[in-house]
Image: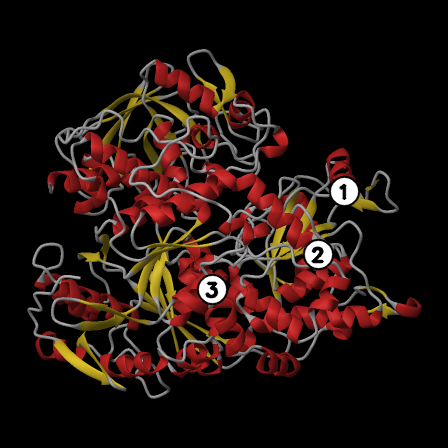
Amino acid sequence: MSVSLDSYKTRRSLTVGKRRYDYFSLAAAEKKLGDLKRLPFSLKVLLENLLRYEDGRTVTKEDVAAVAAWLKEKRSSREIAFRPARVLMQDFTGVPAVVDLAAMRDAMVKLGGDPKKINPLVPVDLVIDHSVIVDNFGNASAFAANVKHEYQRNGERYQFLRWGQKGFDNFQVVPPGTGICHQVNLEYLAQVVWTRKDEKGNVAFPDTLVGTDSHTTMVNGLSVLGWGVGGIEAEACMLGQPLSMVLPEVIGFKLTGKLREGATATDLVLTVTQMLRKKGVVNKFVEFYGAGLDNMALADRATIANMAPEYGATCGFFPIDDETVRFLKATGRAKVAPLVEAYAKKQGLWRSAKTPDPVFTDTLELDLATVEPSLAGPKRPQDRVPLSQAAPQFTGTMEKEFGRKDDGKRVAAEGEKYDVGHGDVVIAAITSCTNTSNPSVMLGAGLIARNAVKHGLKVKPWVKTSLAPGSQVVTDYLKKAGLQDALNKIGFNLVGYGCTTCIGNSGPLPDAVSKAVSDGDLVVASVLSGNRNFEGRVNPQTRANFLASPMLVVIYALAGSMKIDITKDPIGTGKGGKKVYLKDLWPTNEEIAKFVKKNVTPTAFKTRYADVFHGDKFWRGIKVAPSLTYGWDNKSTYVQNPPYFEGMTNTVGGFSDIKGARVLALLGDSITTDHISPAGSIKKDSPAGKYLIENGVAVADFNQYGTRRGNHEVMMRGTFANIRIKNEMVPGVEGGVTKYIPTGETMPIYDAAMKYKAAGTPLVVIAGKEYGTGSSRDWAAKGTILLGVKAVITESFERIHRSNLVGMGVMPLLFKEGTTRKTLNLDGTEIFDITGLSGGIKPRMDVPVTIHRAGGKTEQITVTCGIFTLDEVEYFRNGGILHYVLRNLAKAG
């Protein structure tokens, strides 16, 4: 860490206990910048970052002043350089990032540079949490069986990560079976205040990070500023490049009161998500304030912060206060608590009931007492449904969303004594970081299971149940409370520690259920305690997917149907033929609080995290020899050297116009990164499936797209291959197909792209609003460029995907207000000329586009360049952010 220029003379010292720390004082900065006390806490963290990294080049004195000036307008157009303290990865997104680093080392050698320069310069933690699949469930051996399958499937990937762990500095891997990256971050990795040495001494500063998963925001609940970025941006941060960003607007969300009896943190976050989506907070910070924070446990804050991608914000930040310090102590980090408290109070980063409200760009307010039990679905996390309306709304959903009426048809399950019908819940999964970090809803689920056993209720036989906690600590407190046995008795046995169902790792439905659903073309449902329910994500056979608290997941598993009004109708029939209702099963808030206080202890956190990087016998059994460059195996179907740097030289080319471009896909609104680059199962008759079969992989060993992100051959074939994507060039058809215009044939998008590529024809993708929503997966951009797509033209982009496209050298373009694919009557037969680029690119410049229609007519429109900063212009000019970094490191000698 280099010494700051410190133009504002803010370096001060702080003594905590017997240790002395230097810090960059915001109070000292006020002497020259003016009163900063009402600056949002999240912007104070950015301001400190600029003070600490002021170098006169990437961070200037004027950048610092711009943050103070934000208070006058409550917004800014100033571009700043943010340097996070660390980077967090999960294995789906982490493997391709490490593959890129390995490829950069090879490329550095070819450019005549030193491959040792390709090394993380900031701490990087990669948590393997996305690869466990729920193959086995509902029995005592499920966990062991799933772990064994996980290692069998992912041996090549895990061997590669073991090499990375030894081959790169500042790189740690948390092995499989430990927990979800965001929960491990919240419970162990995060320090709230970090320390690092520079040339003058030991410096204390706010803990900040970026992560390769969109739900990195979960740690905002612990007052750690961070958010999800694409893998390519994360790699640049790791290699010492600042993250370029425009000073954001900050929306203040005022919370008052406290949750009423029966309402959970999940109900709260679904309400917050709906409100903020309606408000519109894309590319903005959200910061929570108000007296309601005094009644809010940190786990509840983390639940809200986790869902920032669902409400569209860059982050959902909670300031440091007494609850922050209490949580650090409760999770075994008592040693860091004194520094956190002392530093926060010195820096004006401490919130209390007496703290004046910050100044925000805009505000909205929620009385916690008004929050009611809810679900969200059937396709989007912002579509909240009050629990009392869930049953009738599902009936309406059948017709509105799925184009059919419920005729009451039920299909016999072959070889079983039950049948399956529309609205049946076939998956009930306690899963995902959002809720499994929260002891109140997890112990609440255990109490419901206990009450269900007491009343003699059983889960319906067609329901696939699973319990995938976010950390091993959850298992400890469920066992200590005596509630795991009750969960086991109704089928919620431990299946693994990982994302499972939320990321699409629900595994196949039992054969009898699967066949009944297919034979009857049934609309069946999943209920999961996750944060994502996009169509095609959870399971290919569940068309309707609902987010709910772990407690409601158990209730719906017992009820077995979305058509039962669980607020009025019996959940089931128990002992002696007695009908059992929701009120018979639901614990009181007071009872849950007592169980949390008694069973969630610092000892469990200290014990479980004492050896967090050690791993089980399988992990320790993976042997690799350390080496500077990776020994690529050409036969591997998991890890391959990507082609991004082929033919690359040290010379940077100029900008070029895009002429004669054909439309690869014409898409609607809310196209998610799941649609663009699916994470789930690979169909055997898809281009990716055919590739795997050709390379000797049995269908049973396909695994899924998410686990094969280290192999570009699989991933480019999987781009736009989601089974639910709808390309308007092929009306009435679902799946990754398009029309190859020169012949009029309908074919897989990959096949058409390769034909266009062979002919030297550039491609464009046209879409509606909110293009690229969802997980921050870089393969949605990498696959796009590898298919030959030069530009994506939409009405609006989600933040991360837009920057990822730029980072891979794809031009994002925005229709002007009032212009859409529909107003232009586009059908995909058009040819596009995108001009005005060869003369140079400026952020947000107007770009002329000429549309050549099939009948010979032409039309010119103007679109907006979706490159927003000067740094992004340089990334694009270099062909991508990795090329930019690589050239700069190679030039440095």
Q: Provide residue 200's location: percent of width, then percent of height.
A: 12, 71
Left or right: 771 in relation to 811 = right
What percent of the width, then of the height, locates residue 653?
15, 29
Q: Please, which residue is most extreme toward the top here?
A: 743
Q: Say above or below: 528 vs 287.
A: above
Q: Nearer the viewer, mark 1 or mark 2?
A: 1
For marks 3 and 1, the one nearer the N-term is 1
Label 1, label 2: how far apart the Cα atoms are: 24 Å
Residue at (52%, 62%) from the top-left corner? 434
Instruction: Say left or right for 277 vs 119.
Output: right
Where the N terminus falls, by quadrant? bottom left
Q: Amino acid at mark 1?
A: Val
Tag 3–tag 2 contact (CB < 8 Å) = no
In the displayed structure, 635 sits above or below 887; it is above
| Amino acid at the residue labelled 2 | Pro
Between disc 3 and disc 2, the foreground one is 3
In three-dimensional space, the C-alpha distance between marks 3 and 2, rounded to whole angstroms, equals: 50 Å
Neighbour class for label 2 at 10 Å: few (<14), some, many (≥20)? few
Say which element carries label 2. helix
Q: Which mark is residue 392?
A: 2
Q: Secondary structure at mark 1?
A: helix
Percent from the top left, x then y, of residue 420? 80, 45
Report the residue marked by disc 3.
611
Residue 537 in sight in this render:
no
Amino acid type of the residue tagged 3 in the rendering: Asp
> In terms of sequence position, does the residue under pointer 3 or pointer 2 come before the other?
2
* Element carrying mark 3: loop
**Would you name the residue on which mark 1 appears?**
513
Which of the 4 image quarters holds residue 811? top left
